[in-house]
Image: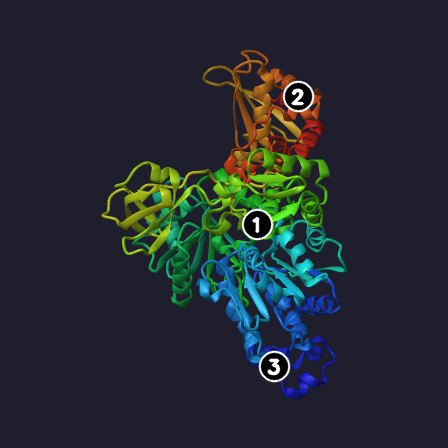
Amino acid sequence: MSRPPTDKLMEDPDTFSRLHEGVRQVLAYRLGWNELRPVQEEAYTAVEAGNDILVIAPTAGGKTEAALIPVIDGILRGSSSGVAAIYLAPLKALINDQEERFRTFCLPNGLEILKWHGDVPKGDRSWGDEEPPHILMITPESLEVLLMERDLAGGLENLRYIIIDELHAFIESDRGVQMRVLLDRLDRIAGKKLQRIGLSATLGNPEEILSWLAGRRHGEVLVQVPVPPRPKRFSFVIEENEQRRADALARIVRGKKALVFVNSRSDAEGVNTALSGQVDELLVHHSSLSPLMRSETEKAFSQAGSACIICTSTLELGIDIGDLDVVVQVGPPHSVSSFLQRMGRSGRRGKPPYVACVMRDTWELLCMVAVIELASRKEVEPLRPPEKPYNVLVQQVLLELVRARRTSKTHIRRFIHGLSPFRSIRSREIEALTRHLVESGILVSDGDMLMLGPGAELTFGRSNWKDLFSVIHGGGEFRAVTPEGEMVGTLDARFVAGGSGRNFTLGGKSWKFLKSDDSHELVVVVPGEGGKSEVFWTGGRAGFSPLVCQGVAEIIRAGGSSLPLLDEERRLLGGLIQEFPPLTPGTLTISERPGKKGPEVRIHTFRGRRWNGILATLIKAGAGRKVAVGYDDFSLNVRNAGKEHAARNIQEILQKIRKRKRDDVAGDLALPGQETWKFSAALPAPLVKEMALADYYRFPEFFSDFSSADLLIDESP
């Protein structure tokens, strides 16, 4: 935008001219703006009127400024001391990345900023006797720590605004529950309903999420300005041979600024190895690399003329990595939301987005095409917060007792019911939890009074209760450090258990595992000596979202894709589609085919891996014979269902399951492992079961869908 004349700023009766002079000066003379984007206009009007807002805009769509402009404007017009605004982000790297943007607005106006997260030196994570900053940039876990310090928490009494960036990253996890609890507690500290400003790029149910964020405390405004459609470029490579696939990928990214998204850390390291020597300035970015290594990767990429980062979802969020020539997707992403985030990385500053899709086979092509079709229709996954967040509940009870040292059961009950994520939890469930905590020695009771017991000290008391501040399960990984003490990243515990002396690849470099210290979860590594490197992360790839699965079914039912594909791509898809029986919406189609050891039955569901996993468990429990059931995101495969009428036998089993009471059927499901929830070991078994059925299995929705679906046997030859 061009630099505006001073008299132009004074004459226009628009939002821009109504801004505080300090904000206008930053926009005009530092950013070169003479107007606001529509999303920023709407956000300013809504915040100025005192509303909570949710801003939905694509990557690089001006979301951050949509929050910053009204907040800085409001701070400059006010005069109170203490922290006026909190910026809450899911990643430390995102805070680091946004710091300069915040400083652009704040420093010219004499406003102080403070970053507070685990990578900031401890001495810099406090304001001590000095004046608190005007804006605090912090993660939920660090905010939990801050609120334990009464003197520092007092600096939040004049708080007015809370900006929550990348809101979608929180919603479906326990971190989202913890974040909502923190918002309620900040309201209490400030003695008023603080304004909440959520920022997100992609949401399938924005109105619901706005209500979840704001809690109907006062006005709620969804700021979602339609983005004019613009051309997008897609290309596809389908190659089963691994070496030829790597060669094709190298041709796509060579000499360009490229992000290559893969779906796992092991894939990132493997693709990097395959491209080594074929592409200059080749970099790797994923969650197991140390923060320093990730930061150096981002810096090197932004400074290089042509460069390529092989990355996982760590670069989906709003960390600015500059202009790109191409985004490459290796294998289809698990969700439309993820794809939109990745595609949004390209196509900035007037260029059309360009996504090159490198697929292993026709099946991956089908899934990728389904994702693109859904995105083109603006169909995005709806997000659902946990319904039975007992894991966070027990964390908050223990934290309250750490703060109070000693308090009554009545206070605990009121404390819990005063936090919006827990208001639907019944008093008898709170009493059952309290009784269990006392019986297990985690708490000690003295009449109506409660205190932390020896069990709490033993399990959570290390490092001044550090384990209580985060709901993220920290076990299962070892820190990899050099003999000089430099942290390289983290390694999977199962890899470490296999013993020392092995080579592995981390961050695109070869390392050798020398020795481990189990008590400190530490591994000493040195640069590798060549030879074969191992894959060291366990756990499979995340399944496709139910929406993507339904999108695949729609293409099969339609007999092809609506995208302008090349003739060869259409031919490949057509051949794959012909392998499926006729599909009907809302129907579970059962087909039978010969197998090596008798007939095999396939149940076509297109409902996702977790849904199919539940059904597989129920079939095995209800079969009364030793059936073998395998499943993926789209179907189940059943063997040993009988040498004759196998499909009919499975249909009858499914019908019997549907005739049982829902609670009886739920009893066939095993509880997930304790590693699923960090504090589940402190919960009574009935509450863990409730939590599992509601939020892990989502069993009520499963049973309703399963019970209403038609069961159709495919009779086609």
Q: Residue at x 41, y 64 (%)?
A: 299
Judging by the rendered image, the residue that carries numbered circle 2 is: 657
Disc 1 residue type (three-letter)? Val
In depth, the one of 480 and 503 nearer the eye is 480
**Pointer 2: residues within 10 angstroms few (<14), some, or many (20+)?**
many
Q: CA distance from mark 2 to mark 1?
A: 47 Å
Residue 443, placed above or below residue 708? below
- SS at mark 1 in the image: helix
In depth, the one of 128 and 240 nearer the eye is 128
Judging by the rendered image, the residue that carries numbered circle 3 is: 25
* Sooner in the amino-acid sequence: mark 3 or mark 1: 3
Q: Residue at x 55, y 16 (%)?
A: 641
The image's colouring method is rainbow
Task: Measuring from the top left, give residue 468's x and y in whole percent.
Answer: 53, 48
Q: Can residue 171 be seen?
A: no
Task: Measuring from the top left, give residue 349's x and y in whole percent.
Answer: 54, 68
Residue 279, placed above or below residue 413? below
Q: Can residue 594 be seen?
A: yes
- Judged by depth in the image, the label closer to the viewer, 3 or 1, is 1
Disc 2 residue type (three-letter)? Ile
Q: Which numbered circle lies on residue 402?
A: 1
Residue 221, placed above or below residue 332? below
Q: Residue furthest left?
A: 529
Q: Residue at x 69, y 58 (%)?
A: 188
Residue 62, placed above or below residue 8? above
